[in-house]
C-alpha cells in the first residue's frame, strides 16, 4: 500500500473519529470507522494474530457463519444463561435484532470484521462490562489487546486521549475500565475465536470459568449489573 493511500486512510480515520464523537457513539458511525481499515496493513496483522489463537485459523478457513441471533428464542432460555442475558441486553438497549451491518465475508479481513462486529455485545455479557462510555472502552480493550483489531485500538486510544484532554473528571473511571479489559485480555482465551452460538443455553458463569475470566466487571461502576441487575 502506498504512502498516499495510508495518508488518505489516516485522514479518513480522523474524520470518522470526529463523527463518532459528534454522534455519541452511534452504531453506523462506529461501523464506518471499522470498515475504513478494510484492506489495511493493520487489519492484515490482526487477521494473522487471529489465525494464531486456538480455533482462529479453523473458523477463518471455514468462514464460520456470522452471528444471526433469534432474540425471541434466546429470551426464553433460563435466567443466567448466555442467550438470556444477551437477549436482555439487546432489548434493554432498544436495538433492532437485525441491526448488524451486512458485509461480504469472502475475504479474511472482511470475515473477521463482521465476526467481531456481530459478537461485540456478547463480549459485554461474558466480560461483564456495561455499555456506557467507560464500559464500552473496557470491552473494546479486550479485543484490541488480544488480536490488535485496529478499529478498537483506535477507539480506545482516542477515548483515553479525549477523556484526559477534555473530560479529566471522567478519565480515572475510563482508564480503570480499560485496564480491567487488558487484564481480562491477558488471562482469558481469545473471545473473538469462541463459537458462542453453540452454547447459548450455558450459564454465563460457566462460560467465564471455561474461558478463564476470573474477575468480570459486572459489579464495577462501569459494569453490566447497573443495567441488567446481578446475574442469578
Image: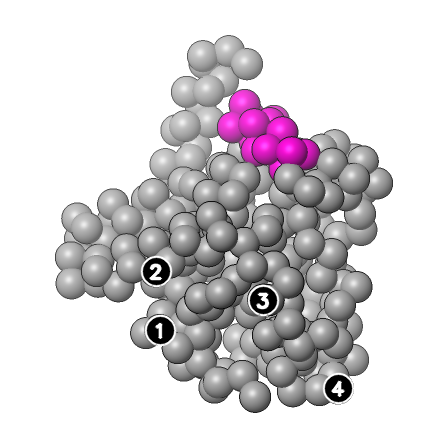
Residue 159 x/y as whole percent = 32, 50
The residue located at (45%, 14%) in the rendering is 4
209 to 73, vertically: above or below: above
- Which quarter of the image is occupied by the C terminus? bottom right
Visible in this render: residue 18?
Answer: no
The residue located at (59%, 33%) in the rendering is 49
Mark positioned earlier in the residue sequence (4 or 3): 4
| Residue labelled with disc 1 | 220
Mark positioned earlier in the residue sequence (2 or 4): 4
Query: CA separation, marks 2 and 4?
Result: 31 Å
Does residue 174 appear left or right of residue 147 in this picture? left
47 to 2, vertically: above or below: below
Rate crowding at label 3 as few (under 14), some (14 to 19) or many (20 or more) other CA atoms within 10 Å.
Answer: some
14 to 178, vertically: above or below: above
Mark positioned earlier in the residue sequence (4 or 1): 4
Rate crowding at label 4 as few (under 14), some (14 to 19) or many (20 or more) other CA atoms within 10 Å.
Answer: few
- In contact (CB < 8 Å): disc 2 and disc 1: yes
> Any mark on residue 145, and which?
none
- For label 2, the SS is helix
**Which residue is outermost to the right?**
62
> Any mark on residue 177, and which?
2
The residue located at (47%, 86%) in the rendering is 229
Mark positioned earlier in the residue sequence (2 or 1): 2
> Any mark on residue 208, and which?
3
Query: CA separation, marks 2 and 1?
Result: 9 Å
| Residue labelled with disc 4 | 76
- Which quarter of the image is occupied by the N terminus? top right
Magenta stretch, residue numbers = 39-52
Residue 202 x/y as whole percent = 72, 74
Visible in this render: residue 42?
Answer: yes
Amino acid at each position: 500500500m502506498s504512502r498516499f493511500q495510508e495518508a488518505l486512510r489516516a485522514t479518513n480515520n480522523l474524520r470518522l473519529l470526529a463523527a463518532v464523537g459528534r454522534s455519541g457513539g452511534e452504531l453506523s458511525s462506529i461501523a464506518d470507522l471499522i470498515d475504513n481499515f478494510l484492506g489495511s496493513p493493520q487489519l492484515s496483522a490482526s487477521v494473522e494474530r487471529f489465525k494464531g489463537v486456538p480455533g482462529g485459523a479453523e473458523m477463518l478457513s471455514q468462514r464460520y457463519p456470522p452471528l444471526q441471533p433469534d432474540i425471541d428464542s434466546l429470551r426464553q432460555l433460563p435466567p443466567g444463561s448466555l442467550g438470556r442475558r444477551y437477549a436482555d441486553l439487546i432489548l434493554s438497549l432498544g436495538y433492532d435484532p437485525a441491526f448488524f451491518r451486512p458485509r461480504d465475508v469472502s475475504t479474511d479481513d472482511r470475515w473477521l470484521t463482521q465476526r467481531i462486529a456481530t459478537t461485540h455485545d456478547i463480549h459485554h455479557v461474558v466480560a461483564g462490562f456495561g455499555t456506557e462510555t467507560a464500559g464500552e472502552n473496557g470491552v473494546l480493550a479486550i479485543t484490541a489487546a488480544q488480536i490488535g483489531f485496529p478499529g478498537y485500538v483506535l477507539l480506545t486510544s482516542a477515548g483515553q486521549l479525549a477523556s484526559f484532554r477534555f473530560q479529566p473528571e471522567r478519565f480515572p473511571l475510563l482508564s480503570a475500565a480499560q485496564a480491567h479489559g487488558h487484564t481480562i485480555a491477558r488471562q482469558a482465551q481469545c473471545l473473538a475465536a469462541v463459537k458462542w452460538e453453540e452454547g447459548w443455553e450455558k450459564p454465563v458463569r460457566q462460560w467465564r470459568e471455561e474461558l478463564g475470566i476470573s474477575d468480570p466487571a459486572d459489579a464495577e461502576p462501569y459494569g453490566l449489573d447497573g443495567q441488567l441487575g446481578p446475574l442469578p
